[in-house]
Each structure stands twice: as structure tokens, then as C-alpha cells.
Image: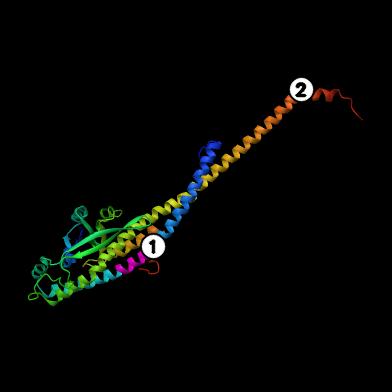
């Protein structure tokens, strides 16, 4: 069924045919894009899951250590010990283009290059548990940053995949069938017009011949042969 | 040059200060939402939010989902894990694939 009104003209037919070719090519490209995005996304999301489990376990363990540390020293001392951090982290954000999706790449820099130089307090008045706690947290930190990067990438890619999938489906199930239907409609209509012109010409020819030769009269007056 | 922030209740996040991350203790959802907006506009590329707080400011976090930075990442807090972090990842899979094919093996 032709849902929209189309002009059954040759010009329209050419236009629609061009559009169909374009739609088919777009459909193929988008489908390829979707498949490739999906492949990369699945890899990434598996990585995301593994990282998240690791980070969550790490943070939980660090939290436990902090609870221990707070149990063995007064609250104020913990606060004072952590009040002035020695370490400082700054972040460089790069971009990577994956199938037209821009995903972030984080590289971090710490102020002091020594990874163990993270204790912002003298060891005299703090318990060893606090050292453990800070250490365990700092061990998990590179993974945390990686997690942020991977999770953001997953988020952006998921959105892009959804968009691409919608486009592919719209082309495949709506745009292309509609175009084909319209093309069929126009070519049928043109054929029909051609046939009717042909018939009209034949009819006109008959009439003109009749006018010139009076076949009917001749037929009537002709002697009947037996 | 970007910075990293941690947002959540004080007990969950004070340890991150030792790593050189900026900590922003908040006590209720309104404060958290306001703080998050402030952080997002002032050069923080990664904002870790404890799951308990993240659950309360979901619409606020969703506003940044389409942007490259900041990346807002839920982390478990001291008061325990609400599971919203892993649920988030699950949601990405559902959004992209249409159904959950990564986590479907494990029931929770």
C-alpha cells in the first residue's frame, strides 16, 4: 500500500530509485558500524565488569583497614594525619576515536614520583593500621582510574550503539520497504498509462479508417455468400 | 589539567584524601546534587560517588552521561555496597544489546 501520495511521473521514479540506492548503501554501512561497535563494546564491558569487581573488593578491603585504624587511634588524630595530603594527582584527558565515538583516555600524574611517598604524617603518633589502610587504597587507585575510563567508554558506546541500531532498523524496516513500494507503484502506474495510450491510439486509428473507407457500409451492402 | 574528586559521606571517603584526591563530604541529597554540579563545571574529569549518594541523585548524574568529561563513577562506601555500580554496567549492556547477555549467567 502506498502510504504517502507520490506523483506517478518518470522524474519521481528516477528520484526514488536514486534514494533507494543511497538508503541501501547507508543501511549496509550503518549495519557494519553497529556490528563493529558491538564487538568492541562487548570486549570493553567484560573488562569493565572484571575491573569493577576488583575495585569494589579493593575498596571494601581498604575500608576495613580504615575502620581498624580508627579503632586503634582517636578520631582527631586520624583527621589530623590525613588533613594535609602530601600527594597530589592531576589528570590528562585524551580522546580516542572508536567508530566515530569519542572515548576518553586518562593519564594521571602524581606530584611525587615515588609511589610509596604517600603518607602525609609522621609515623610516631599514628598506628600501623592507618599505614596499611592508606597503602591498600593507593594500590587500588590505578585500577580505579582505569575503571573510570572504561566505564565512561562503555556508557558512551552503549548510547551510540543504541542510536545506530535505531537508524539501521528505521532504514531496514521502514525507509527501504516504503521506497520499494513507491517505486513499484510508480512503475505500475506508468505501464498502465502506456497501455491506455496504446489502446486509445488503436481506437482512434480504427475510427479514422472507418471514416476513410466506410468498411461497415461495404460490409452491409456486400452480397451474402453462401 | 584535570582533577579528581570523591563525593560521598565523610566516613566513606576521607581515606582518599591521602592519595591526593579532592574529597567533598556531603550529608544529604540536595547538598550532593549541588556539589556535583559545581564539581562538574570546575575542571574535574573523574568524580567518584559513593553508591548510597549516587542512588539519590540519579537524574543529576544522568545529565553528564553524554559528555566526555566528567566521568562519574559509583564506588562502594563504608556503609556497604548497594550494588548500583554493577547494576549500572548491566544497564549499559541492556541499552546496547537489548538484553543482558553478560550478567544473565549469575542470578542475584
Q: Are the residues under marks 1 and 2 on the same chain?
A: yes
Q: Is residue A8 above or below residue A29?
A: above
Alpha-carbon span between mark 1 and mark 2: 81 Å
What percent of the width, then of the height, locates residue A115? Answer: 18, 71
Q: Secondary structure at mark 1?
A: helix
Q: Chain of mark 1?
A: A
What percent of the width, then of the height, locates residue A18? Answer: 51, 44
Alpha-carbon neighbours of circle 2 within 10 Å: few (<14), some, or many (≥20)? few
* Rendering quarter of residue A95: bottom left
Question: Between disc 1 and disc 2, whose residue precedes?
Answer: 1
Highlighted magenta segment, given as a residue range:
A39-52
Residue at left offset 72%, top offset 28%: A205
Secondary structure mainly formed by the magenta segment: helix
**Image quadrant where one finds the C terminus of chain B:** bottom left
**Image quadrant where one finds the N terminus of chain B:** bottom left
Label 2 belongs to which residue? A212
Label 1 belongs to which residue? A40
What percent of the width, then of the height, locates residue A25? Answer: 48, 50
Task: Name the residue nearer the viewer: B82 or B70.
Answer: B70
Q: Chain of mark 2?
A: A
Q: Nearer the viewer, mark 1 or mark 2?
A: 2
* Rendering quarter of residue A80: bottom left
Left or right: residue A91 versus residue A29 is left
Left or right: residue A70 versus residue A223 is left
Determine which of the numbered discs, if any, sits on residue B55 in the image: none
Magenta stretch encompasses residue B92: no
What percent of the width, then of the height, locates residue A74? Answer: 9, 72
* Rendering quarter of residue A76: bottom left
Alpha-carbon neighbours of circle 1 within 10 Å: few (<14), some, or many (≥20)? some
Left or right: residue A184 versus residue A137 is right
Q: Residue furthest left?
A: A124
Amino acid at each position: 500500500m502506498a502510504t504517502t501520495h507520490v506523483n506517478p511521473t518518470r522524474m519521481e521514479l528516477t528520484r526514488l530509485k536514486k534514494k533507494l540506492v543511497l538508503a541501501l548503501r547507508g543501511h549496509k554501512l550503518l549495519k557494519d558500524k553497529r556490528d563493529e561497535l558491538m564487538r568492541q563494546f562487548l570486549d570493553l564491558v567484560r573488562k569493565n565488569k572484571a575491573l569493577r569487581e576488583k575495585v569494589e573488593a579493593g575498596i571494601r578491603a581498604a575500608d576495613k583497614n580504615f575502620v581498624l585504624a580508627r579503632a586503634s587511634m582517636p578520631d582527631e588524630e586520624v583527621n589530623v594525619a590525613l588533613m594535609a595530603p602530601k600527594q597530589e594527582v592531576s589528570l590528562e584527558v585524551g580522546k580516542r576515536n572508536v567508530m566515530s565515538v569519542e572515548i576518553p583516555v586518562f593519564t594521571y600524574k602524581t606530584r611525587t614520583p615515588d609511589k610509596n611517598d604517600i603518607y602525609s604524617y609522621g609515623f610516631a603518633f599514628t598506628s600501623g593500621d592507618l599505614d596499611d589502610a592508606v597503602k591498600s587504597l593507593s594500590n587500588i587507585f590505578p585500577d580505579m582510574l582505569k575503571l573510570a575510563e572504561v566505564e565512561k567508554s562503555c556508557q558512551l558506546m552503549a548510547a551510540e550503539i543504541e542510536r545506530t541500531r535505531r537508524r539501521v532498523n528505521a532504514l531496514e524496516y521502514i525507509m527501504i520497504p516504503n521506497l520499494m513500494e513507491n517505486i513499484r507503484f510508480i512503475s505500475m502506474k506508468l505501464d498502465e498509462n502506456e497501455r491506455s495510450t496504446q489502446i486509445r491510439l488503436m481506437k482512434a486509428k480504427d475510427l479514422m479508417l472507418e471514416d476513410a473507407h466506410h468498411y461497415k457500409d461495404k460490409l452491409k451492402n456486400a452480397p451474402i455468400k453462401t | 589539567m584535570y582533577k579528581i574528586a570523591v563525593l560521598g559521606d565523610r566516613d566513606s571517603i576521607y581515606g582518599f584524601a591521602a592519595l591526593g584526591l579532592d574529597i567533598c563530604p556531603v550529608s544529604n541529597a540536595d547538598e550532593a546534587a549541588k556539589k556535583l554540579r559545581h564539581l562538574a563545571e570546575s575542571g574535574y574529569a573523574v568524580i567518584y560517588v559513593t553508591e548510597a549518594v549516587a542512588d539519590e541523585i540519579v537524574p543529576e548524574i544522568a545529565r553528564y552521561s553524554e559528555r566526555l568529561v566528567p566521568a562519574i563513577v559509583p564506588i562502594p562506601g563504608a556503609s556497604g555496597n548497594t550494588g548500583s555500580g554493577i547494576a549500572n554496567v548491566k544497564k549499559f549492556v541492556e541499552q546496547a544489546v537489548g538484553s543482558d547477555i553478560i550478567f544473565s549467567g549469575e542470578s542475584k
